[in-house]
Image: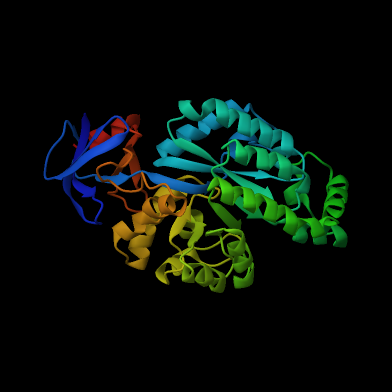
Amino acid sequence: MQAVSSSRVLVSDGRIVPATVAWDGASIVHVEEGAHAALDAGDMLVLPGMVDLHGDAFERQVMPRPGVAFDMDVALAETDRQLVANGITTAFHAVTFSFEPGLRGGDAVRDFMAAMSRLRGRLACDTRVHLRHEAYNIDAVDEILGWIADGAVDLLAFNDHTPPLVEKARTGKSLLRFVERTGLDPAAFAALLLSVGERAGEVEGANARLAEAARRAGLPMASHDDETPEMRAAFRELGSSICEFPKTTATAAAARACSEASVLGAPNVVRGGSQSGAIDALRAIRAGLCDVLASDYYYPALLLAPFRVAAEAGLDFARCWDLVSANPASAVGLRDRGSLAAGKRADILVVDDRDARMPRVAAVVAAGRPAMVDLSVMRSRR
């Protein structure tokens, strides 16, 4: 049996108290108030590991520059180190399967899925597949159905970024931001978009087929960038219980009114607003319209955000930490993690929060195994 003690442990009822967390194998055995263990974290915070439902920063390891790709195994192994260093012990890699070639095309996604199959047992972070189906990628539906049947997908999301791009192609507006990852020249990409746009009538049926398969498999589903309550309602009818990055407060409110998870980006909190002009995450949290934060495109933001919310919104820290631990775990049915309690998975963080604007991860235990120790931080607190 192993254990860590601190004068400040976030226990499962939301209190921060002196306690020892003991684990054996991959599970927590007990959380005992007031005791001491061989690994003494002093007065550093001991917290449940973070659960990240949507992170696509791994794409920067796969393709750090447009058109410059690296081996998928190398990219995912490096991403694993980044996740653990930032306190993320469960991560859903948000991989987009689009009709376009390049980073989000079929060859790259198949390479990703194969690498995930090879590496799952070797990664420190419990890394899972959040498959983002781009709605106009009709020809990929049968392949995705096969992955769902094989249990290779852990979260299915419905994306629909195509119509505004088709409009840009029709009107001759710049597509440079989107072209670089495809390897196509602008004219070829515009022609592809116009061709794909002609399949709009097939989107609803394709989504319905995927949703039916996901329901049969007990797979959680998310809708992405919902613009209106009506759009959320349509995905609700398909069985989607996660509203990912709602565009308006009305849409977020519609999700919460139905007890659905409303997910916003941690970078939104850290940067002080949405980079795309959508709703402000901090205001949404204050208003009870966001109950999950995700790293989105920047892993370090997930650790920083709860501390910012606690300081700037005046909310109880335990409630803020739930945004990145208990709440996302609950949203996807992972009942074995998200809090420090007997029987839960031993995902444990030791965090130095002397500077609450830039907390530092001192140590990480993932499924009972030491995954990272920053000796410089641990020694500085003794």
Image spot of residue 190 (x, y percent): 85, 51
Residue sitting at 22 percent across and 56 percent down? 15
Q: Quadrant of the C terminus?
A: top left
Image spot of residue 353 (x, y percent): 29, 48
User: What colour scheme does the image use?
Assistant: rainbow
Between residue 274 and residue 139, name the one nearer to us. Answer: 139
Residue sitting at 49 percent across and 37 percent down? 127
Residue sitting at 50 percent across and 58 percent down? 263
Between residue 113 and residue 55, name the one nearer to us. Answer: 113
Q: Quadrant of the N terminus?
A: top left
Instruction: Examine the rendering and report whether any part of residue 307 can be seen.
Output: no
Between residue 240 and residue 52, name the one nearer to us. Answer: 240
Instruction: Examine the rendering and report whether any part of residue 168 can be seen.
Output: yes
Query: Residue 161, relative to residue 48: is it above or below?
Result: below
Residue 46 picture quarter? top left
- Tag count: 0
Residue 126 picture quarter? top left
Q: Is residue 65 left or right of residue 10?
A: right
Image spot of residue 349 (x, y percent): 32, 41
Q: Residue furthest bottom?
A: 250
Q: Residue furthest front?
A: 216
Query: Residue 104, relative to residue 209: is it above or below?
Result: above
